Amino acid sequence: MDDSQTWTAVPGAAQRARSVLEAAWSCAVTAQGGREEYVGAHTVREDGRVVLRVPEDSALGTVAICAPRGEPSAVLEFADVAPVPVRDRIRARLRLAGRLVPEARHLVFHPARVVLRQPSGTVVVGTEEFTAAAPDPLALAEAGLLTHLADAHPEAVERLTRLVGPDSLHGAVRVRPLAVDRHGLTLRVERARTYGDVRLPFHTPADDVAALTERMHVLLLQAGAASCPRALQRQRADGDG
């Protein structure tokens, strides 16, 4: 893969969907007209099937056992919430439609339709592509990584703004880390009434936390060599006054 491909790479829709599913802690389940929400009650198998551990007296368990055809249809919904407080913290929503199959003491959900909704648009992901995809290797570590960056290293976030074009920083009142994956870091630039997101790609993908540390170090070195954007300079001057 050449530098230009690496520099512009972003997660594909299937991997993004699997990452949302992997990191989500809660889900909403709709089946037979009823809706229940569960926290910490699901796990994901390698092929994308979702295992639900529901209480024996739950309505969902009753539906699964008593369904006329034995495998009721259901819809599972997951929200991808930014771990760092920002405006509009929902980064993506994942909706899976399929069937529930009772298995031992839990339910196994087999997805038949996968829909990923992001600010950039809504994508229907093919089930074969979804099944074959793997979540981003940083998906489970992302929340801790971003909160640590925001809380313990605000000066590093400020330095990274030197890699952002002046137009994107115009009117900025706050910049926060919004997301990170193996391909790059995304910053949320908040203004008085609006906001925008800026992506800082890594020079090569990071497949673990150690590699991510190196990629971030490279970005900070690049930022150290860049001049401070005029928009941010004006913002600081106005604040000092």
Image: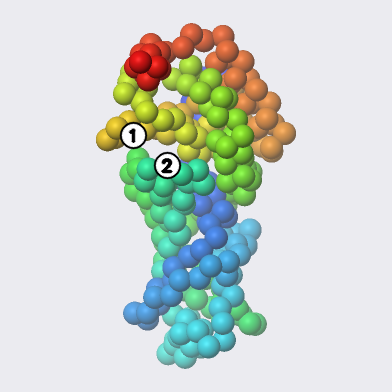
Q: Which quadrant holds residue 219?
A: top right
SS class of the residue under badge 2? Answer: loop
The disc placed on residue 115 is none
Q: Which quadrant holds residue 156?
A: top right
Dot 1, how many residues are within 10 Å of its Cα: few (below 14), some (14-19), or many (20+)?
A: some
Residue 112 visible in the displayed image: no
In front: 205, or 151? Answer: 151
Q: Which quadrant holds residue 87?
A: top left
- First in residue order: circle 2 vs circle 1: 2
Dot 2, how many residues are within 10 Å of its Cα: few (below 14), some (14-19), or many (20+)?
A: some
What separation in Å lies between label 2 and label 1 (alpha carbons)?
Answer: 10 Å
Residue 201 x %, y %: 52, 26
Residue 72 x %, y %: 44, 80
Residue 205 visible in the displayed image: yes
Tell me the quadrant of the picture where the N terminus can be found: top right
Of the residues shown, which amino acid type is indicated by label 1?
Answer: Tyr
Tell me the quadrant of the picture where the C terminus can be found: top left
In front: 127, or 89? Answer: 89
Of the residues shown, which amino acid type is indicated by label 2?
Answer: Val
Q: Are marks 2 and 1 in contact (CB under 8 Å)?
A: yes
SS class of the residue under badge 1? Answer: strand
Residue at 43% across, 75% down: 36
- Left/right placement of residue 119 relative to residue 200 reads left
- Left/right placement of residue 21 relative to residue 216 reads left
Q: How many marks?
A: 2
In front: 13, or 203? Answer: 203
Q: What residue sits right under mark 1 in the picture?
A: 195
Residue at 48% across, 18% down: 163
Residue 151 x %, y %: 57, 37
Q: What residue sits right under mark 2 in the picture?
A: 86
Q: Residue furthest left?
A: 193
Note whether 42 is above or below 228 in the view shown.
below
